[in-house]
Amino acid sequence: MRDRANPYRPRETKHKTWHRSPAEDINPSMPNIHEGLAGEEQGRSCRGDDNDSNSMSGLKQVSELDDFGLAEAQNDGMLLLSCLLEDSLRFKMVEGESADLAQLEDDPSVRQVVANGARMRTNVVEAKLDEGNIQEAESALREGLSLNSEEARALLGKLEYQRGNVEGALRVFDGMDLQEAIQRMQPSISDKQAPKKGRSRTESITAVPQNASSVVLEAVYIKAKSLQKLGKLTEAAEECKRVLDAVEKIFSDGIPDVWVENKLQETVSRAVELLPELWKLAGCYSEAMSAYRRALLSQWNVDNECCARIQKAFAVFLLYSGIEVGPPNLAVQIDGSYVPKNNLEEAILLLMILMRKCYLGKVKWDPSVLEHLTFALSICSQTSVLAKQLEEVMPGVIRRAERWKTMALSFSGAGQNNSALDLLRKSLHQHEEPDDIRSLLMAAKICSENVFLAAEGVNYANRVIANAHGSNAHLKGVGLRMLGLCLGKQAKTSSSDFERSRLQSEALKSLDSALALEPKNSDLIFELGLQYAEHRNLDAALRYAKQYLDATGGSMIRGWRLLALVLSAQQRFSEAEVVTDAALDETSKWDQGPLLRMKAKLKVSLFQHKDAIETYRYLLALVQAQRKSSGPLAAVPQMEDDNINEYEVWHGLAKLYSSLSHWKDAEACLGKARTLKEYSAETLHTEGVIHEKQGHNSEALASYINGLLLEPRYVPCKILLGAVLSKMGTKMLPVARTLLSDALRIEPTNSMAWYHLGKVHKEDGRIADAVDCFQAAYMLQESEPIESFSTIR
């Protein structure tokens, strides 16, 4: 039976037999007690992981003791229980410490410092810093994280900077020895770049020195940032430069892609990006330029996004800084490689590299890169290159309608109006953006420059006027202006006089309405003056020409040209020459070409042929000098402009010499013009005139026909071909009349066409028609300018 007073007394059993060792025979109770204590020590070493099992084992052994030595066993059992309770309490304390550590790691509100695999709360260090005890704070970090003096000071400075105490961070950074950190880092890097054999051992040995050195370099970078915030920009730039100089000494062949600690690479990338910005803020633009080129030409192992930011910032600086520096001096240059010659070329090169990175998906799409590239290419008149860049943009990056509009604008700026109009038609499709006013205005503008597209332009202009409401109401005047220009062009292709008159009156009405909405728009004033001049309403044209000059202050060449042509149409050649001389005084040398050509023709009208020849010679020298001084980007213009080219000068001299019957000089000048432009209707027309004056009618007839084959709508060849055919007998009179009538359909105000048509009617016996034609020719000749008004753009 079990004794109720002793619960640990074992039950009596008949079948259980104890097998004791000799030691147990000496003292049967002690081995079991020692076994329980051994279980206790094992539980302590395992930090309580097996406490429950060990304690139950010990209790079981105690419960199986026999009655021999019962009192001693009870005392030893109480000792065992006390030991077990103490071990359980220690296990709970260790478990609580582990929970606190996990809470410290997971709680973002707890500020801590991490180094060498150890963590430390910052509250103790911050308290010492607040008291001004920098040395004690440094000692606490050195002891808590196993750091040396420089590493501890670097972490202290970073801590102060993060707290916003910039001046305190600078005080901490004073006295740091960067050179010692570099020397300590160099062997670690050389070990890092050792062969892969035994790599894990080398890494474990050298990881700590590299990490420590990266901490010091980061401290120098933070010192530069602190100086920047205090406005000490030059000192900040010098400190930032120290970081890069140190890295270049360590990595003489450039930073490799591997074996570099991430913290060090991050510091280097930030310093590379910060240095040129600091030099710019300090006003040291030459140093900034050198820093940008150093960042891009040296091997810093920066990522694509960081490199793209540096390239974009450098391109923006080159475009807008106004500081012109020499081209980069490359130590190693591949034969045939392109080296930019000025800021603009270098900026375009950088922006095109960025665009290509966007195409390849290496960096994210940045719309501002396209905007800067558009500006740069527009400056050098190379918008056709911009159109090619836009063609390479992957679908989905830019809305296709937006891309079509931008490409159309680029092609239009390059003079490729047909390609631009095709893109605008796609953009204005009913399933795209049919009511986009910007596209409608651009399409109407392109159509207004071509008589065959004028009718289509009228449709676009009317759609602009219909959609000019709300936020676009201010564009109604622009739409009316485009409508007037397109109607004026459409009138030139009209087959009936009535239709032509109606379209001309509607054109003037639209321009007047636009001027009523925008009374201070100088472009509208000029367009009205030009329209009245083409309709031979010279008084109104003269009034608007003077008004345009007043509005622009005489700064626009086309205003001077319009005024001079109107005066020449009024046969006031001397006054026109005075206006031309005044315009030459107000115009730069490279823009004087059209004015000099006009002056030469005025000299011819005043029968001052020698002066006219001298003016042409001066113009020729000016054009040749301008061609030689033009840069590579301007050597091939992307579209024709108002400037005179060398071909026009030689052709003008040939016409002048032919009018003076100087055949050899005329043929020499014509040969020069033909070498510059081999196939030209103008050259063939002048050649035919020379042959006709020399009595070679068959050669003249061949020249006129060839000119019309090259350009079927060339009016001078039509007129002279009809005149030559009218001399070949009555059978050719219908053909001549058809050619002259077609010429008048194209240019209703051509006096020579009316004159030769009158001669054809006279030969055909139509005296009344001949009289009308001669009268029209006389009236038009009295109001004919020295140049066509259509030459003014």
Image (cartoon, rainbow, N blue to C red):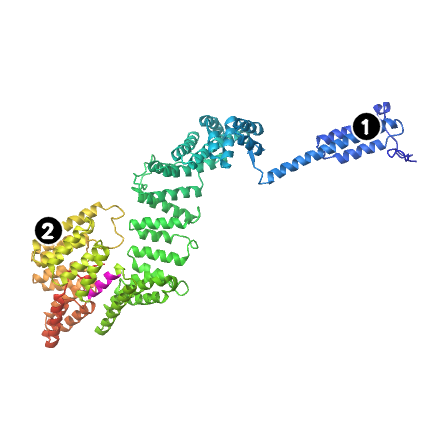
Front in this rendered view, residue 689 or 420: 420
Q: Position of residue 92 (x, y in %)?
A: 71, 35
Identify the residue at the far right of this view. 1
Magenta range: 524-534
What percent of the width, then of the height, locates residue 235? 40, 32
For marks 1 and 2 on the same chain, the one whose residue lies earlier in the sequence: 1
Residue on which the image places disc 1? 33
**Dominant SS type (magenta):** helix
The N terminus: image quadrant: top right
**Residue 452 visible in rendering:** no
The mark found on residue 359 in the picture is none
Distance (Cα) linking label 1 and label 2: 132 Å
Q: How many marks?
A: 2
| Few, some or many residues within 10 Å of mark 2 (<14, 14–19, 20+) | few
The reply to whether residue 191 is in sight is yes
Q: Looking at numbered disc 1 in the image, what kind of residue is underneath it?
A: Ile
| For residue 126, above or below residue 356 | above
- Kindly identify the amino acid type of the residue bearing the numbered disc 2: Glu
Check disc 1 and report its element: helix, strand or loop.
Answer: helix
Packing grade of label 1 (10 A; few <14, some 14-19, many >=20) is: many
Magenta highlight on residue 663:
no
Image coords of residue 392 (percent x, y): 38, 52
Mark 1 and mark 2 in contact? Answer it, CB < 8 Å. Answer: no
Query: Left of 259 or right of it: where is 525?
Result: left
Kindly identify which residue carries mark 2. 614
Residue 525 belongs to the span the image colors magenta = yes
Left or right side of 382 for 87: right
Task: Decide: is 781 above or below 183.
Answer: below
